[in-house]
Amino acid sequence: MIKLKGNNDLKNKLIIDDIEIQFTKKNIKNIHLSVHPPNGIVRISVPKRMKDEAIRLFAVSKLSWIKKQQSKFENQERLPESEYVSGESHYYFGTRYLLNVIYQESNRSKVEIINKKYINLYVKEGSSKDKKEKVMKEWYRKELKALIPPLIEKWEKKIGVKVESWSIKQMKTRWGTCNTTARRIWINLELAKKTPHCLEYIIVHELVHLIERNHGDKFVFLMNKHFPNWRAVKSELNGLVFG
């Protein structure tokens, strides 16, 4: 059964074989289809004048490919949801560490790496899971924040663009995003758990969008020119989903 829903004539949802497909009509010439980790969300960007029935037929023609991509995400290795207890595995820029939760009387929480093997999390006695998670995320944010400015500066010069501002935020379906009008980029906080070249790839990806908004031939050409191994890094980036 196929349904169209949504009261905005530019953004709609198409359902085929119980797969929800989000489509957006834009001022573009070509159709762009993508399936996003970790949950296999399907998005299609189409030219503004494209009829809904034509979009449906296109989606039906790509249904086998869509299911194949979604199956890849379903079969990905996933880290179990963190409970923030001692002995858990936590990743820091691609390296696995064991967590030590150290309770103390002081309210001054902190995180530090010990012997290149452990992450020590210092929190007040009785701290909840949410509190420990908050402390860890604040630490990840601080660490990530230190790496981003020099990478942006490096690639601004190489690519020939200028970012007006950048931010870090938690995102479920994207590693990064770019507002080309405001020339602002967002970086996913989860990149603090990935290897540094994954962070660099995402920064290059978003900076290239300041030249080319879509993922068409021009975008691919620019990525090949500036970051030749981007496909390998992209595969690595999507190889492990942090729950």
Image (cartoon, rainbow, N blue to C red):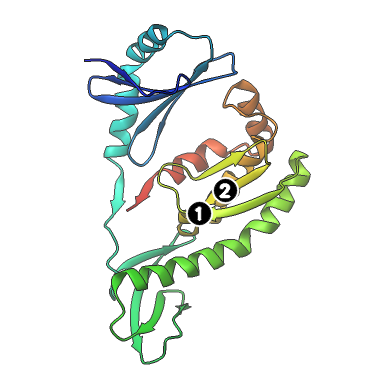
Question: Does dot 2 land on a helix, a strand or a loop?
Answer: strand
Horizontal arrangement in the rendering, residue 213 relative to residue 188 (left or right): right
Q: Is residue 71 above or below residue 176?
A: above
Question: 3 or 111, which lies in front?
Answer: 3
Question: Please, is residue 132 above or below residue 170 in the view?
Answer: below
Residue 98 shows up from this direction: no
Q: Determine whether the residue tagged by mark 1 lies in a helix, strand or loop.
A: strand
Disc 2: CA contacts within 10 A as few (<14), some (14-19) or many (>=20) = many
Residue 112 lies, in percent from the top left, at 47, 78
Hey, which residue is sitting farthest bottom in the picture? Answer: 105
Sequence-first tag of 2 and 1: 1
Look at label 1 and name its amino acid.
Lys
The residue that disc 2 covers is 186
Q: Quadrant of the N terminus?
A: top left
Residue 135 seen in the figure: yes
Horizontal relation, residue 48 to residue 241: left or right: right
C-alpha separation, residue under disc 2 versus residue under disc 1: 7 Å
* Residue drawn at point x = 36 percent, y = 73 percent: 132
Q: Is residue 208 above or below residue 117?
A: above
- Expressed as whole percent of the image width and height from the top left, the position of residue 69 reads 34, 29
Q: Quadrant of residue 35?
A: top left
**Tags 2 and 1 in contact by the CB under 8 Å rule?**
yes
Q: Amino acid at mark 2?
A: Trp
Q: Position of residue 109 (x, y in %)?
A: 44, 81
167 sits to left or right of 165:
left
Q: Quadrant of residue 85?
A: bottom left
Q: Mark 1, residues whose alpha carbon is within 10 Å: few (<14), some, or many (≥20)?
A: few
- Which residue appears at 64% of the width and 39% of the height? 227
Task: Determine which residue is flagged by label 1.
Answer: 169
Residue 169 as seen in the image, left or right of residue 162: left
Residue 174 position in % (x across, y down): 46, 42
